[in-house]
Image (cartoon, rainbow, N blue to C red):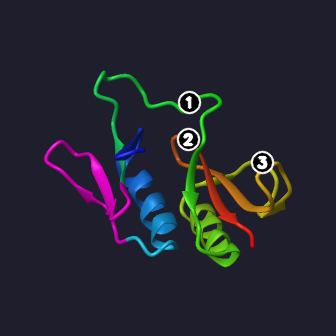
C-alpha cells in the first residue's frame, strides 16, 4: 500500500543519528543523503525518509499520528526502543510490553523522535 514515509526534521544530524540507531536495531543500514539534504533508509519493502520542511517552517509532529515499524520479535522491539532512548528519543505511552486488544496480543514499544514524531515498534505475538 505504501511506497515511502517521510517525516520532518529540524536537526537532520540528530534525527539521522536517531534513525540510524533505531532502524539499525532492525537490521537496516545507515541512511544516505540526497543532493537536497533529505536522508533515506531503503529496504525491499519500503523507504523511510527525513527532511527539513520545504516550506521553511519548523518541522512538527502530527497530533494523533503514529508511524509503526514491524518487528521480528519482542527482543528486536526492545533493542529498537533502547537505541532510540540512547540517541535522542523520548519514551511515550506505556513501557514496552504485551498489550491485549481486538487484533490479538501485540508487543508494543513507543518513542518520540527528536522532532516529536510518535513511533511504534510492533510485534504480533504467536
Q: Disc 2 marks which residue?
A: 117
Who comes first in sequence, dot 1 or dot 2?
A: 1
The answer to which quarter of the image holds residue 41 is bottom left
Q: Report the number of discs.
A: 3
Contact? badges 1 and 2 (CB < 8 Å): yes
Mark 3 neighbour density, 10 Å: few (under 14) some (14–19) many (20 or more): few
Queried whether the magenta region covers residue 100, the answer comes back as no
Label 2 SS: loop
- Residue drawn at x 75%, y 73% is 126
Q: Disc 1 marks which residue?
A: 62
User: The N terminus is located in which quarter?
Assistant: top left
Q: Is residue 66 above or below residue 26?
A: above
Label 1 SS: loop
Mark 2 neighbour density, 10 Å: few (under 14) some (14–19) many (20 or more): many
- In the image as oriented, which residue stretches furthest toward the right? 100
The answer to which quarter of the image holds residue 66 is top right
**Where is residue 110 drawn, in percent x and y?**
68, 54
Q: Nearer the viewer, residue 63 or 58?
A: 63
- Residue 83, which numbered label? none
**Where is residue 14 drawn, in percent x and y?**
43, 53
Q: Disc 3 marks which residue?
A: 93
Amino acid at each position: 500500500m505504501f511506497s515511502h514515509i517521510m517525516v520532518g526534521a529540524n536537526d537532520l544530524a540528530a534525527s539521522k543519528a536517531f534513525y540510524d540507531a533505531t532502524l539499525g536495531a532492525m537490521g537496516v543500514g545507515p541512511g544516505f543523503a540526497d543532493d537536497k539534504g533529505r536522508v533515506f533508509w531503503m529496504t525491499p519493502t519500503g523507504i523511510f525518509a527525513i527532511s527539513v520542511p520545504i516550506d521553511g517552517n519548523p518541522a512538527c509532529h502530527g497530533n494523533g499520528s503514529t508511524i509503526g515499524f514491524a518487528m521480528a520479535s519482542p527482543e528486536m522491539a526492545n533493542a529498537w526502543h533502547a537505541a532510540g532512548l540512547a540517541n535522542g528519543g523520548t519514551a511515550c505511552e506505556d513501557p514496552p510490553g504485551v498489550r491485549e486488544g481486538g487484533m490479538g496480543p501485540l508487543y508494543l514499544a513507543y518513542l518520540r523522535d527528536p522532532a516529536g514524531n510518535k513511533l511504534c515498534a510492533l510485534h504480533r505475538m504467536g
